[in-house]
Image (cartoon, coloured by chain):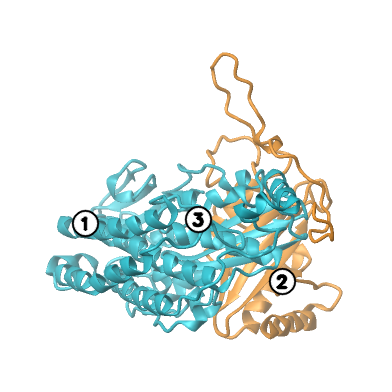
Chain colours: A cyan, B orange
Amino acid sequence: MHRHLEEPPRPGHQGTEVLTINMGPQHPATHGVLRLILDLEGEVIVGTKPVVGYLHTGFEKQMETRTYHQNIVFPARIEYLATFIEEMAYVQAVEKLVGITAPERAQVVRVILAELSRIASHLVWLGSGALDVQVTSVFIYAFQDREEILDVFEMVSGQRMMHSYYRIGGLASDLPDGFEERVRRLMERLPGRLDEYEALLTDNLLWRGRTEGVAVLSARDALGYGCTGPILRGSGVNYDVRKAFPYSGYDRYEFDVPLGKNGDAFDRYLIRLEEMRQSRRIILQALGGLPGGPVLVDDRKVALPPRSELVTSMEAVIHQFKLVSEGLRPPAGEVYAAVESPRGEKGYYIVSDGGNRPARVRVRSATFNNLQALPVMIFHGYIADVVVAIASLDIILGDVDR
Amino acid sequence: MSGAAALLDRLRERFGDAAVEAVEFRGETTVFVPAELILEALGALREAVEGELLLTDLTAVDRHPAEPRFEVVYLLTALGAPVRIRMKVRLPGELPSVASVTPLWSGANWLEREVFDMFGVRFVGHPDPGRILLPDDWEGHPLRKDYPLTEEPVEFVGHTPKVPSEIIPQVTPRPMRGGDASG
């Protein structure tokens, strides 16, 4: 019996005592440091109070003290599973503020890397989510696939996770040789692997028993709590930033947005699996139409001059010096730019006062809003399902606490 | 864009031209309303849009030392015909407070607690006021501009703590695209 808020919790109505227990902050199923104070009536949850903030590191304050270029390193450290998507969110916000767009080739490369990131992030979710209900084999397989995607990232940027490969106005460097073949090879294998996971989970009675009808969230609650991403779409609301406010040329690609019907953990699982297949579709389209040309804007007030120019042009040296020592200075104003991260809408709201450092950077985190819906999801559910509910939310505490 | 303009007209109809001040920058519309009207204005906006209106974000900006010092920012997304609009209220530096919008969106709960935590803005009628990210006994509100960003004290000998906000010199604002190469 999963619950509605219309029915208020009645402490001790079954003649039992209400027991308050503490879950976390150090608990293997909380995917980080999340603490839950649970009120239990037997095995049934009658109240939940999430306690967050254990990973608060003051990213927003730090970003106010550095130049726009120096801040590129932060996004991937706030949310460390879909790193390329995070960097994209920040870089696009600054580009909007300055009033430039990245060259065509850079935009397409960003889409390819973003969708690869989405697949890698969903694979981590799939593996660890399955592990939470003791399906160990999927964990091993999913991490193996993810590792191969991270190898591609390393090939591109030199880093598996904290890439800092994007620049304001484009990319740090062009793609390495052999990138396309390697991604194509990965994409050829992916559908077969996903079918295998489906065979292991969708047809698995235990998995279905643990996820179907568990952690149900109605569309009304999802909207009220500002949920986005697979959580909102799992409840049947069609909102995907890539479709609603297309960026980086997403309107040119054909892809579907999968929606759920019941808003339970099983629907969210199906949506994430389908999103991986759709990401593959986008990657193949993008690889097919990868244009040539530069990967960084030719605007010396924004992007560093190429190294070859430094030995021949005094102006290039001055630009280089100014950009490195002071940074760029966008006009006074404020922008919000969002991307669709694997967890929902990730946005950067940047306020500039015309100086070389942002006056305010606000990280709109998808998981912070999504986590708020947890008490409603598990209200009048069993304590054993809390683990499934947290897993289905796909939270990253670094992103929740910032 | 037309979507945001239409919404703006509806707000002006309801509250009068004097109360609703709009700014446009890079294709984004920001609407300032008087702080005491915020619940009504957000309610009116919710009725005016097609489909659902999502409270995407709620945050604040500190304009220290200017006065009114704080701006509370409501970022709204209409899902029917996708359009974004930003609503703002200005609050004084002394005892800033504004009505809580939790009656309209339950998700405003944590967002308002975070704004209180970081800026010290109080939300009247909030069901669960208090800090959220920082410990309950924390002093001060870190995202205020007069709250310095410093190092934690360490016990090494000969270590001079630096103030990270002073490592990069603040350059006075001036137009970005000057004609000269040194710009």
The type of residue carrying mark 1 is Phe
Q: Quadrant of the C terminus of chain B?
A: bottom right
How far from the left and from the top, in percent, is residue B92? 80, 52
Q: Is residue B47 left or right of residue A287?
A: right
Proximity of marks 1 and 2: CB atoms separated by less than 8 Å: no
In the picture, measured across the screen, residue A59 lies left or right of residue A122, that is: right
Of residues B102 and A266, the one drawn nearer to the viewer in this rendering: A266
Q: Is residue B157 above or below residue A359?
A: above
Mark 1 or mark 3, which is nearer the start of the sequence? Answer: 1
Residue corresponding to mark 1: A139
Q: Secondary structure at mark 3?
A: loop
> Which subunit holds the residue at mark 2?
B
For marks 3 and 1, give the one nearer the viewer. Answer: 3
In the structure shown, which secondary structural element does the residue marked by tag 1 occupy? Answer: helix
Label 2, on which residue? B26
Question: Residue at 15% of width from left, 72% of height from top?
Answer: A199
Image quarter of residue B81: bottom right
Residue on which disc 3 sits: A165
At x 57%, y 59%, the residue is: A90
